[in-house]
Image (tube, rainbow, N blue to C red):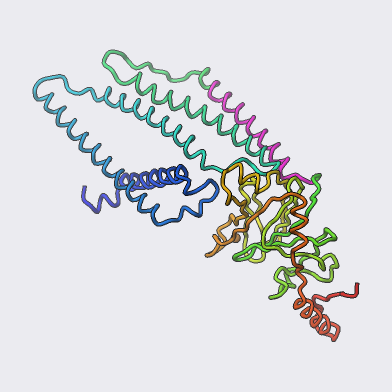
């Protein structure tokens, strides 16, 4: 095979992709074992050293492929020599059958390795009340599919091994068997029905949260490329928003004709009191973003012009999670889960779950959105408006 042909060969590309994948997975597993990275913090993976390591595994994969090809050629020569000497040639059917058995054992070990080593790289236990239900649904689905996976692989490769072509027996012709048809239709139908119904009720309980009262209402607004947070002030109510009122100072377009807006607060960190029901009101100002808080098993799109919301109860404080994960630097994060533009990766916010008293201390220190500068701007706008210009964002400060 010429070099040009090798480059365009699908098999060669497939081998290259497989070695890249295996190499990066192997290195990630090593990094986790050494404690260089921790579960849930994939950003720290982007080190140049890792890619040199992947290249090493790609080369190792290519060397292994060459060795197998050379071994194949040697066997072929050996086989031809046996034929020339009038001896019994290699039984290729038995040879392939043994290879199938080896493939089954290596493959099953690979699946076990992946479960134990990479399994530890998944997220830690859920930190929200509904997350426990989602996790149990995920675990049940994984357990069932794992059982089916092992049974089907053992049957597939076991049949290839035990019923390989042989001169000593004749193949059994089986055109149709109703019992087998019934078994492999009814059993998957029952299992899938159980999974779908279980999933439906779990999803209903998560999304259909109308009877869960939101103790704290928080506005989360996405724009390219940051999240803005708005907390209600002492009145516990958030004022109305109107995107047409957005200015340099009034970044969210808060409507100050609504008195509930006066004491609204701005914050840099999403701080949540533990075991309280939280309602996130989700907005977007430009393109579709997505509020993604994986530790709370929470994701909801932020759509311009269509406010959405998500209610949930955080159940594990940041400090508890730090001691449980043995990681004193652990932080919950709020990500954007829509590729919304060039600096999409920058849309991260720290989420901190604290006790009720810590929350009260923190909220008391947050600054109001209505700054003196903004008050000044609104007064000018109100004066202009009363002088006959277009109606604008008036401020009724005579309370
Ligand atoms: Cu985004």
Name of the residue lying farthest toward the bottom: 387
- Position of residue 286 measured from the top left corner of the image (x, y, whole percent): 64, 66
Q: Is residue 146 above or below residue 393?
A: above
Residue at the spot x=31%, y=13% of the render? 169
Report the front residue among 106 and 94.
106
Residue 34 placement, left or right of 62: right
- Position of residue 299 measured from the top left corner of the image (x, y, whole percent): 64, 50
Residue at the spot x=33%, y=46% of the render? 57
Q: Point out the stretch of residues depicted in magenta.
A: 183-210
Report the front residue among 9 and 329.
329
The question of residue 201 being in magenta is answered with yes
SS assignment for the magenta stretch, majority: helix
Q: In this view, does 225 lie above or below 21?
A: below
Name of the residue lying farthest toward the left: 85
Q: Indicate the quadrant containing the C terminus: top left, top right, bottom left or bottom right.
A: bottom right
When asked about the image quadrant of residue 398, the answer is: bottom right
């Amino acid at each position: 095979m010429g070099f040009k042909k090798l480059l365009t060969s699908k098999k060669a590309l497939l081998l290259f992709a497989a070695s890249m994948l295996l190499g990066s997975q192997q290195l990630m597993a090593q990094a986790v074992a050494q404690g260089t990275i921790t579960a849930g913090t994939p950003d720290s993976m982007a080190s140049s050293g890792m890619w040199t390591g992947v290249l090493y595994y790609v080369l190792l994969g290519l060397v292994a492929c060459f060795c197998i090809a050379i071994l194949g050629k040697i066997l072929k020569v050996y086989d031809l020599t046996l034929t020339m000497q009038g001896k019994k040639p290699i039984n290729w059917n038995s040879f392939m059958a043994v290879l199938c058995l080896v493939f089954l054992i290596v493959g099953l070990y690979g699946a076990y390795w992946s479960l134990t080593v990479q399994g530890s790289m998944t997220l830690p236990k859920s930190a929200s009340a509904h997350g426990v239900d989602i996790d149990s649904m995920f675990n049940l689905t994984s357990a069932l599919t794992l059982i089916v996976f092992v049974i089907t692989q053992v049957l597939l490769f076991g049949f290839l091994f035990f019923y390989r072509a042989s001169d000593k027996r004749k193949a059994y012709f089986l055109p149709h068997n109703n019992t087998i048809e019934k078994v492999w239709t009814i059993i998957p139908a029952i299992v899938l029905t159980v999974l779908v119904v279980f999933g439906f009720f779990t999803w209903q309980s998560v999304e259909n949260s109308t009877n869960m009262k939101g103790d704290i209402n928080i506005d989360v607004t996405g724009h390219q490329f940051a999240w803005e947070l708005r907390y209600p002030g002492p009145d516990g109510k958030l004022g109305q928003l109107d995107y047409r009122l957005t200015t340099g100072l009034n970044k969210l377009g808060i409507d100050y004709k609504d008195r509930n807006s006066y004491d609204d607060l701005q914050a840099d960190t999403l701080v949540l009191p533990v075991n309280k029901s939280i309602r996130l009101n989700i907005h977007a100002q430009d393109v579709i973003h997505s509020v993604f808080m994986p530790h709370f098993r929470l994701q909801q799109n932020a759509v311009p012009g269509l406010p959405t919301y998500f209610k949930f109860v955080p159940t594990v404080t940041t400090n508890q999670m730090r001691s449980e994960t043995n990681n004193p630097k652990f932080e919950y994060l709020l990500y954007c889960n829509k590729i919304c533009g060039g600096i999409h990766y920058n849309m991260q916010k720290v989420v901190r779950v604290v006790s009720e008293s810590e929350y009260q201390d923190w909220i008391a220190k947050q600054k109001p959105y209505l700054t003196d500068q903004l008050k000044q701007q609104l007064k000018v706008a109100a004066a202009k408006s009363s002088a006959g210009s277009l109606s604008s964002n008036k401020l009724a400060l005579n309370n």
